[in-house]
Amino acid sequence: MTQIQSMTGYGRAARRTPAGSVSIELRSTNHRYLEVEPRLPNGLTALQGPLTELLRRGVRRGRLEVSVALHAARSDHRRVMVDEPLLARYHAALLALQRRFGFKGPVTLDQLLALPQALTVAEERVPVERLQGPILSAAQAALRELVRSRQREGARLARDVYNQLRAIERHVRAVKRRLPAALAEQRRRLRQRLRELLSPGAALSASQLEQAAAIAKEADIHEELVRLESHVAYMRQTLSGDPLVGKRLDFIAQELMREANTMGAKVNDARAVQHVVDIKGCIEKIREQVQNLE
């Protein structure tokens, strides 16, 4: 049961890199299929493929939001570059203008540095290849934490489903105890109705014959009770098997509700009807829970 995962969870991890530190946050929510939504800083989009592939090995259903943040080290990685060849051309051009227009005075360094692109500031970037290892290591650690949180929530949901199954079984036993008296009363009404339909001299129409057949058919819910118990047993077996159970449990819950609705339509005993209503309430709770399971 502890291997069953909810589709909601959270995981976070951080690692040191040559450019500082990296932190990764994973948030997963319900989704019909697996959808990975990575958000990476500029310059790291090349890691989207390896990162997504890693996460897909640990999560099989749900919408997974991935946030990657780089935190630069305190030391300044910016570098000032002086374009000396460009300054030389600037200097030669200014001297030529002085001679042409008869200007006097020196060409100063301040004047040269104020000209466009004389100085540039470049950010020293660490190659993506050197960041890939720490980032994927952080992603693996965050994934482990995410899976643990999903398993804890999945175990809680599974325990609640087990509790609802036990409640359904209690109500089924109560219906069975009530069934003999309910069937006796139902058969009494059936015989009375059939005597009315089949009285001497009565000209039965096709609709009356269909009505009589329907009354006889609705006299027992034994078949529905057997199928209901079978579905409960199958759901319990499924919970203890493959951890990827969400879709299958949802289908079984639909079948449970189908049998409960049929029982509710057939049973005319007030006490038995109340137990059927309670069974349907348990099934609704199960359906709410299994919608969150992977």
Image (cartoon, rainbow, N blue to C red):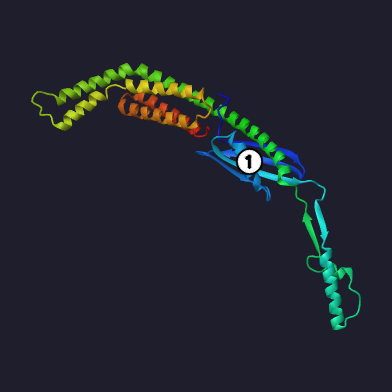
Coordinates of residue 3 in the picture (x, y in percent):
57, 26
Coordinates of residue 222 in the picture (x, y in percent):
32, 20
Along the viewing direction, whichever of 59 and 125 lies nearer the viewer: 125
Along the viewing direction, whichever of 121 and 74 lies nearer the viewer: 121
Coordinates of residue 267 in the picture (x, y in percent):
31, 25
Position of 220 with respect to 42 (left or right) is left
Q: Residue at x 87, y 68 (%)?
A: 110
Q: Pointer 1: residues within 10 angstroms few (<14), some, or many (20+)?
A: few
- Count of labels in the image: 1
Position of 229 with respect to 44 (left or right) is left
Quarter of the figure with the N terminus: top right
Along the viewing direction, whichever of 97 and 148 lies nearer the viewer: 97
Q: Residue at x 68, y 38 (%)?
A: 136
Vertical arrangement, residue 264 with respect to residue 45, above or below? above
- Dot 1: what SS? helix
Coordinates of residue 37 in the picture (x, y in percent):
59, 44
Q: Which residue is mark 1?
A: 50
Residue 7 appears in which quarter of the rendering?
top right
Instruction: Specify the amino acid type for callout 1.
Output: Pro
